[in-house]
């Protein structure tokens, strides 16, 4: 196997990818090298910046330099001793409508120059195309992919099998399944550039996840053209392992300054918000006085520093099991990025299936965007599928969460314990206490120390969607359990009466006696007397 996964979080992973030239660590960013206008020499990218791999376009090399890279060998031609990936001209098909090369020729050329990672000549679907047009690109790409295995002559190159289909997700799905059956070492999501240029990151997320669902999970996935650091975290969280960036150089040519939160023009800046070696000793006004060439090199270099730093932060976040938090922070760089993360609620089951949910650390819950977290999905499934309340439980007593966790050790629970003592052993055994709490919904008190029910911090007050989720989870729980009655200690303000409304409805539907007492859990003794009387009433009815 050329790819070995070391650490995982969400669908992101830290892996080792072995090429014939070197072993590189993923998530990996390949700076795009354009030999004719390259602002930073490739070997410097490795020696001074630490880039382990670069990507260049085999179609352009062949067109401009013909046989020279074959004679010299690609690494010598570029002067780069790490791993080199080549693209095949698919992007040029997308932009110019066609290329003057056959797949057979460009496969032979990539073998001839000695690429470490190479790409077949796929047909990009593009963005504004009909389903019929998209179908043609998927079918032709697949035909070429199958033909390729008869065309290749070397076995030491890692070949990329691109998935097409564009925004037509059923086509992406079938393309991924069919490409996944072929023995490619790497896959790529084809033609996402236009989707990103239109800021449709929600569509992009659908495309990536649809591709991931169809592809063998153990193969790395490359996202072509995703070169901006503000979106690396999202893409990694969705399962992309490899990226290429031409943006660092293209932006530099246009005086554009990348940050992990967006892009600025140099003339808009009074300060460089960056502590890389370049920005630390330069100012925007100082930079403007330099020659265009010096400016371009400066910006290309510091744009790369920003990209590299972000990739490292993402890796550390994967190690720490905090990729969700990191991604949540990053997607606030742009509303369209946040839309994509919000959109993950639709893929929560898939996210949960491949994410580690047992971690050594707790997590932070900010707002309802976090409801797509695999930990929450995991708990919901476990509670639904595997949990049964104590056999003698007749009355369900629902109490609001306390600020301190675990709930049963919080000071507020003293009064509940007192109430149970006064009910006596036999009666209190028939009362089952569950805590309604954000973000997990409903927590049977005896489980409140199970990870991560106590190992998280949530931001107060909860937003409406979070409260509604808790209410719906509580209602669902009542519906599928067989309690004889339900009593609710209702905190009207924090829970906006949503839990009460949901409980009322599901008890009506199930024809269960239901009472609620409006009070804070830290409420007066009198409240707990009332609660005790209600419980006695419920229990006596059943005795
Ligand atoms: Zn900088």
Image (tube, rainbow, N blue to C red):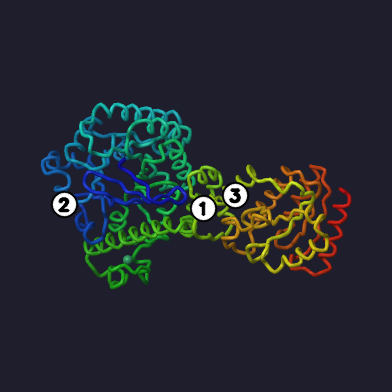
The residues bearing labels 1 and 2 have C-alpha atoms spaced at a distance of 45 Å
Q: Is mark 1 within 8 Å of ligand 1?
A: no
Q: Please, what secondary structure does the residue beneath circle 3 have?
A: helix
Q: Position of residue 461 (x, y in %)?
A: 64, 63
State which tag comes first along the sequence, 1 or 2: 2
Q: How many other residues sit within 10 Å of disc 2, few (<14), some (14-19) or many (≥20)?
A: few
Q: Quadrant of ligand 1?
A: bottom left
Residue highlighted by disc 2: 79
Foreground mark, 1 or 2, reads 1
Q: Describe the element under mark 2 as helix, strand or loop.
A: loop
Front position in the image: 133 or 154: 154
The residue pinned by badge 1 equals 358
Q: Where is 419 relative to 195, above or below? A: below
Which marked residue is nearer to the observer: mark 2 or mark 3?
3
Q: Earlier in the sequence, mark 1 or mark 3?
A: 1
Residue identified by numbered label 3: 379
Extreme-front residue of the structure: 425
Label 2 CB-ligand 1 distance < 8 A: no
Q: Earlier in the sequence, mark 2 or mark 3?
A: 2
* CA distance for labels 1 and 3: 11 Å
117 or 250, which lies in front? 117
């Amino acid at each position: 196997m050329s790819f070995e996964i070391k650490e995982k979080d969400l669908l992101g992973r830290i892996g080792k990818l072995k090429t014939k030239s070197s072993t590189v660590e993923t998530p990996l960013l390949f700076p795009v090298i354009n030999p004719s206008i390259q602002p930073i020499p490739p070997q410097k990218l490795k020696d001074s910046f630490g880039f382990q791999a670069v990507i260049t376009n085999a179609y352009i090399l062949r067109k401009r330099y013909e046989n020279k890279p074959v004679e010299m060998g690609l690494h010598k031609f570029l002067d780069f001793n790490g791993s080199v990936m080549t693209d095949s001209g698919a992007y040029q098909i997308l932009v110019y409508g066609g290329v003057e090369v056959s797949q057979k020729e460009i496969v032979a050329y990539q073998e001839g120059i000695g690429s470490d990672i190479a790409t077949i000549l796929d047909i990009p679907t593009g963005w504004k195309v009909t389903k019929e047009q998209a179908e043609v690109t998927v079918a032709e790409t697949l035909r070429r992919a199958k033909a390729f295995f008869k065309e290749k002559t070397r076995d030491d190159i890692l070949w990329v099998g691109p998935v097409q289909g564009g925004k037509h997700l059923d086509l992406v799905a079938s393309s991924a399944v069919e490409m996944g059956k072929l023995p490619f070492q790497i896959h790529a999501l084809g033609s996402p550039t236009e989707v990103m240029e239109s800021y449709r990151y929600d569509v992009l997320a659908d495309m990536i996840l649809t591709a991931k669902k169809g592809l063998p999970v153990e193969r790395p996935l490359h996202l072509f053209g995703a070169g901006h650091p503000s979106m690396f975290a999202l893409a990694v969280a969705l399962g992309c392992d490899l990226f290429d960036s031409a943006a660092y150089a293209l932006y530099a040519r246009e005086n554009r300054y990348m940050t992990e939160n967006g892009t600025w023009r140099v003339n808009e800046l009074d300060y460089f918000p960056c502590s890389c070696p370049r920005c630390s000793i330069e100012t925007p006004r100082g930079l403007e006085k330099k020659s265009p060439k010096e400016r371009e090199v400066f910006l290309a270099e510091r744009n790369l520093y920003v990209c590299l730093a972000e990739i490292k932060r993402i890796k550390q976040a994967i190690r720490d099991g905090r990729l969700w938090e990191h991604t949540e922070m990053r997607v606030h760089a742009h509303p369209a990025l946040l839309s994509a993360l919000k959109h993950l609620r639709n893929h929560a089951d898939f996210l949960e299936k491949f994410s580690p949910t047992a971690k050594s650390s707790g997590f932070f819950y900010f707002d309802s965007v976090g409801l797509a977290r695999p930990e929450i999905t995991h708990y919901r499934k476990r509670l639904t599928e595997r949990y049964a309340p104590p056999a003698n439980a007749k009355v369900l007593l629902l109490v609001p969460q306390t600020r301190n966790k675990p709930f049963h050790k919080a000071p507020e629970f003293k009064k509940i314990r007192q109430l149970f003592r006064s009910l006596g052993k036999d009666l209190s055994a028939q009362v089952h206490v569950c805590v309604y709490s954000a973000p997990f919904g409903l927590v049977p008190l005896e489980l409140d120390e199970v990870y991560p029910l106590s190992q998280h911090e949530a931001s107060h007050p909860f937003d409406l969607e979070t409260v509604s989720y808790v209410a719906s989870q509580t209602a669902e729980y009542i519906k599928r359990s067989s309690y004889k009655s339900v009593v609710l200690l209702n905190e009207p303000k924090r829970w906006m009466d949503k839990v009460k409304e949901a409980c009322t409805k599901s008890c009506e539907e199930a024809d269960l006696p239901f009472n609620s007492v409006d009070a804070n859990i830290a409420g007066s003794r009198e409240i707990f007397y009332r609660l005790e009387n209600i419980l006695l009433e419920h229990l006596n009815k059943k005795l």
